[in-house]
Structures are given as C-alpha cells and as structure tokens.
Amino acid sequence: MFEESEQIGDEKEIIGEETISKEEMSGLFGGSDEPRHPRPPHIKYKVGQVVKHKLHNYRGVIVGWDEKVKAPDWWIKRVHGTEEIDEPNYTIIIDTRDRLVPQIAYVLERNILLSEGGIVHPLINHYFESFDGKCYKSRPWHKNVYPND
C-alpha cells in the first residue's frame, strides 16, 4: 500500500514508485519558501510540534504545512483516490526509531495528534536549533517562512 511518505535521496525524492526532481518539488509538499503570514486560524498544528500519526503509528516533528494539499495530481490520486481534500496538510520528518530509513511524510491534519519527546532524524538540525522538551525552535531562516509558529 502506498503511504504518505517520501524517502530522502541525494538527487531525487522517492515517492512510492515514482520520482520527482528537487526542482519539481519546489513549492510542493509544504516546501514553499513563501512566508505563511498571516497564519490562518484553521491551521491546528505548528512547525516544531511533535506529533504521532494515528494510522501508521510513527512519531515525527512538523517542518511545514499547507492550507490545502499541494502535490502533483498523480500523487494526490494515489494517496487519496477521488476524495476531495480541503484541509491542511503537514510535512513531518519521521523519527528514525520508528522508520529505520530517514523519511519525510506529507499528511492530512485529521491523521495526526500531538505527542511528546524528542525526534531522531538527520534533518533535525537543518530545521531546528533547539528542543525545549515539548517543541522544537526553528532556525531563523525557517522562522522567516513560518513567523507565527
């Protein structure tokens, strides 16, 4: 079964059996550099929060979000079928203690809930400068994209 995650690679992001170049991914999967300001009131979770996936049971930390799904049509159809998706989507780096290969997931808001504890992932220090025991603090460049998180 196709899951909502991508495996990190040097030249391509692997998404299911398909690949997308890093250039094609620009602006997709919560990866836009456009500042998310003002923060829409219906966005429930914030960048830096630790969450758990309700269905797949992995933990991770939110590194981005979109008000609505921003992904290629083929990906949306494979993951969601014909269901109309009109809710926030979150980019999550998955704890490598839950998935041995470092992965990034792009998930619907309804599929996550808050969790606790630190996350182990090679990209943690790329996005965050510290962890206060509950939430990760974004690096300045990342805070510029999500100023209200």
Image (cartoon, grey):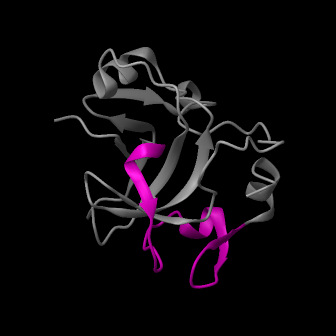
Q: Is residue 36 above or below residue 136?
A: above
Q: Which corner quadrant of the image does residue 3 belong to?
A: top left
Q: In this view, does 35 lie above or below 76?
A: below
Q: Is residue 148 above or below residue 77?
A: below
Residue 11 position within the rendered picture, expressed as x and y whole percent measured from the top left? 45, 39
Residue 65 position within the rendered picture, expressed as x and y whole percent measured from the top left? 60, 44
Q: What stretch is highlighted in magenta?
A: 109-138
Q: Is residue 68 left or right of residue 12?
A: right
Residue 140 position within the rendered picture, expressed as x and y whole percent measured from the top left? 80, 63
Residue 76 is covered by the magenta coloring: no
Tell me what residue is drawn at x 78 percent, y 58 percent: 143
List the single residue furthest toward the front: 42
Q: Is residue 31 left or right of residue 110?
A: right
Q: Which quadrant is the N terminus positioned in?
A: top left
* Residue nearest the viewer, comparing 110 with 67: 110
Q: How many tags in the picture?
A: 0
Residue 50 position within the rendered picture, expressed as x and y whole percent measured from the top left? 50, 67
Residue 129 is covered by the magenta coloring: yes
Q: Is residue 130 above or below residue 90?
A: below
Tell me what residue is drawn at x 25 percent, y 53 percent: 56
